[in-house]
Amino acid sequence: MIRKNRVITGVLAAGAVAALAAGCSSSGTSSASSSTAPSTAATSGSAGGAAAGGATLKTASSPDGQIVVDGSGRALYLFKADTGSTSTCNGSCAVAWPPDHTTGTPVTNGLTASLAGTTTRADKSTQVTFHGHPLYYFANDTKAGDINGQGLTAFGGAWYLVDPDGSAVTGMGSAPGTSPSTSGGNGGY
């Protein structure tokens, strides 16, 4: 299990370096993380992207039960290392775990609207929050239904899917390519 986690972390690091290098070579600015973030308006051809400039949050079924996804059905994650609604995932972290950006107030579908909000990131962009947690994509999730980031530990903390009440989904379901945290007993939870 430890070896698998190291392999996944190595793959994430290599991907982050490559993406960061590509972003820096084309613009010379720190916008590499925002250029790799999935669009909330259209990703996998699913209907239901951003409405009136705001990201859309809704629920979907997963092996771990109902989870929060974007308007296109892409899984969203929370980072346990974040402090309150302040994101601590920047630089290469934000390449591997792109923030769910928005230009307006998030819209909810089947979720408690008062749990949806936004926070201002260090780069002054606006990130979607849910129940006070900044939300992220996982770069290795390429389509709706992918939950490859569930339970991974990277960049100083664990990453979890979000359930409709805003809590971390700590089950491991049958997500391909995941491995539990190696930080302690009972999978680190």
Image (tube, rainbow, N blue to C red):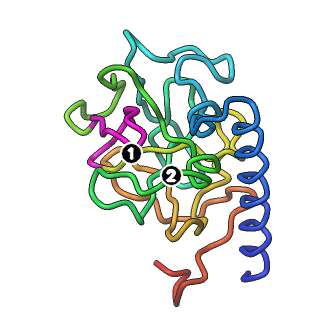
Residue 12 in picture, x, y percent from top left: 72, 58
Q: Quadrant of the N terminus?
A: bottom right
Whether pointer 1 and pointer 2 mark residues with C-beta atoms closer than 8 Å, the reply is: yes
Q: Which residue is located at x 24 percent, y 30 percent?
A: 113
Q: Which of these two is toward me, 187 or 92?
A: 92
- Is 170 covered by the magenta stretch? no
For label 2, the residue is: 90
Disc nearer the start of the sequence (1/2) = 2
Whether 33 is drawn above or below 176: the answer is above
Q: Secondary structure at mark 1?
A: loop
Q: Which residue is located at x 39 percent, y 14 percent?
A: 53
Kind of residue sitting beneath label 1: Ala
Q: Is residue 179 left or right of residue 80?
A: right
Boundaries of the magenta span: 116-132
Whether 131 is drawn above or below 48: the answer is below
Residue 153 in picture, x, y percent from top left: 58, 69
